[in-house]
Image (cartoon, rainbow, N blue to C red):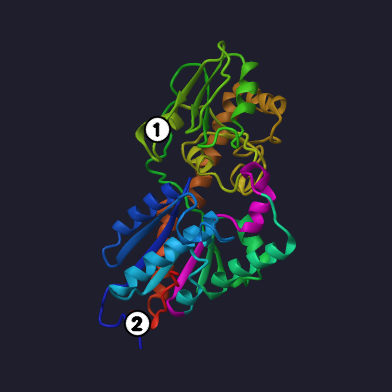
């Protein structure tokens, strides 16, 4: 017998990591939830924090374990106030200590990339694999909540393939649902403003996102100017390069949206990445993208269709790709139109988040235990 019979609204609880592009994902998710008056929902944010607390002197004192510790403690506190009908945990870093909860409460674990994916691009993040014995234990720890969850959502096919190959998750339990962007907010201008060829870079971590290579490539690019949106310190901008550095722009800020709309190209020659939100935002604004073929980027930047792919750490090839687009407004326009079509079809946040909510509604129709039946995480 369903707990939801009689018309009671399902109670949905979201636990969402708050690093990098996951912040914008939270904003979009809350916007979609606010448009669903027939569900009760709450969001628990898990911010990044440096080492501390009871895990600080243990091998578990990494970001993933700290995030999961914080998530489990806040989940326990919430469940003591009353039951929920379905859980949503994003990313898997929040779920490492939640296998028991997921075995009792229907839930989804969502992720942008698996740890095995991160191993492929980890050098740029300062990440390295440990001894195989440790890596085997990590795979087991990650696999447990994935197996306990009612379903797993991957942001991209790259991550979905790894879930199957590296963690043994059944393909039928995986849904590929990109986080998407607000395609009404991130939308092209009716006409391109007059002026020089404008290249836009959006990346919180300037070096990892290939900022130094872009600056070097831009030095030899005549008739162009550069907008850098980053939280990092930027040194070594040549005096003869027309460059503006923009700081403190929050996700979805009007100033950021305006930069996308006025750009001719988004350049993201990243040294390591998974599914950068900046690429989807550019596509939604009908801006072609020049980027590295890493992670899930080729699923969005389709070479010669919605942009151009260039090897990372290769300023010469990057400059050539930018020259091609600088010299061909017609090609830029065609790529931008196809990118906008792709964004509307696969990366619309409203559509994709409604899919997530519909999945949780279906899961919420099952039976759920009382809070007293849920063992809290140990705190000592």
Q: Nearer the viewer, residue 45 or 264?
A: 45
Which mark is on residue 248?
Answer: 1
Residue at far right of view: 132
Q: Residues within 10 Å of mark 1 (few under 14, many from 20)?
A: few
Q: Secondary structure at mark 2?
A: helix
Residue 91 visible in the snapshot: no
Tell me where residue 269 appears, x and y as whole percent: 63, 34
Q: Is residue 30 above or below residue 81?
A: above
Inspect this view and state whether residue 79 appears: yes
Q: Residue at x 56, y 61 (%)?
A: 60
Which residue matches tag 2? 372
Q: CA distance from mark 1 to mark 2?
A: 44 Å
Determine whether 276 is above or below 373 in the image: above
Q: Residue 236's spot in the image, x, y percent?
A: 58, 19
Report the span colored magenta. Answer: 104-127
Of 313 and 80, the residue lying toward us: 80
Confirm whether the magenta stretch covers residue 17. no
Secondary element at image label 1: loop
Q: Position of residue 356 (x, y in %)?
A: 43, 63
- Marks 1 and 2, the one that precedes in the sequence: 1
């Amino acid at each position: 017998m369903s707990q939801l019979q009689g018309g009671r609204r399902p109670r949905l609880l979201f636990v969402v990591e708050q690093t990098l592009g996951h912040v914008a994902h939270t904003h979009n998710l809350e916007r979609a939830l606010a448009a669903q008056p027939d569900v009760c929902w709450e969001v628990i944010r898990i911010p990044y924090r440096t080492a501390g607390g009871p895990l600080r002197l243990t091998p578990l004192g990494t970001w993933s374990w700290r995030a999961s510790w914080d998530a489990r403690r806040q989940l326990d506190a919430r469940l003591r106030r009353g039951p929920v009908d379905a859980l949503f945990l994003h990313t898997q870093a929040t779920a490492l200590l939640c296998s028991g909860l997921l075995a009792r409460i229907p839930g989804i674990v969502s992720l942008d990339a698996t740890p095995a994916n991160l191993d492929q691009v980890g050098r740029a993040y300062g990440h390295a694999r440990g001894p195989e014995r440790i890596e085997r234990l990590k795979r087991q720890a990650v696999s447990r909540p994935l197996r306990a969850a009612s379903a797993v959502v991957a942001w991209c096919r790259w991550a979905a393939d790894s879930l199957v190959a590296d963690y043994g998750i059944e393909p039928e339990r995986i849904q590929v649902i990109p986080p998407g962007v607000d395609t009404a907010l991130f939308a092209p201008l009716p006409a391109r403003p007059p002026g020089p060829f404008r290249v836009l870079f959006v990346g919180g971590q300037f070096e990892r996102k290939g900022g130094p290579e872009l600056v070097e490539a831009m030095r030899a690019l005549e008739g162009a100017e550069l907008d850098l949106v980053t939280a990092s310190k930027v040194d070594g901008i040549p005096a003869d390069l027309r460059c503006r550095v923009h700081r403190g722009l929050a996700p979805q800020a009007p100033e950021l949206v305006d930069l996308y709309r006025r750009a001719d190209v988004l350049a993201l020659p990243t040294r390591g990445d998974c599914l950068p939100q900046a690429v989807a935002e550019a596509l939604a604004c009908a801006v072609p993208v020049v980027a590295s073929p890493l992670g899930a980027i080729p699923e969005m930047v389709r070479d010669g269709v919605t942009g151009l792919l260039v090897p990372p750490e290769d300023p010469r090839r990057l400059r050539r790709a930018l020259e091609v687009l600088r010299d061909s407004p017609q090609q830029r326009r065609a790529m931008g139109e196809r990118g906008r079509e792709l964004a509307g079809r696969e990366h619309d946040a409203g559509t994709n988040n409604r899919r997530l909510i519909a999945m949780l509604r279906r899961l919420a129709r099952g039976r759920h235990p009382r809070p007293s039946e849920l063992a809290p995480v140990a705190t000592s």
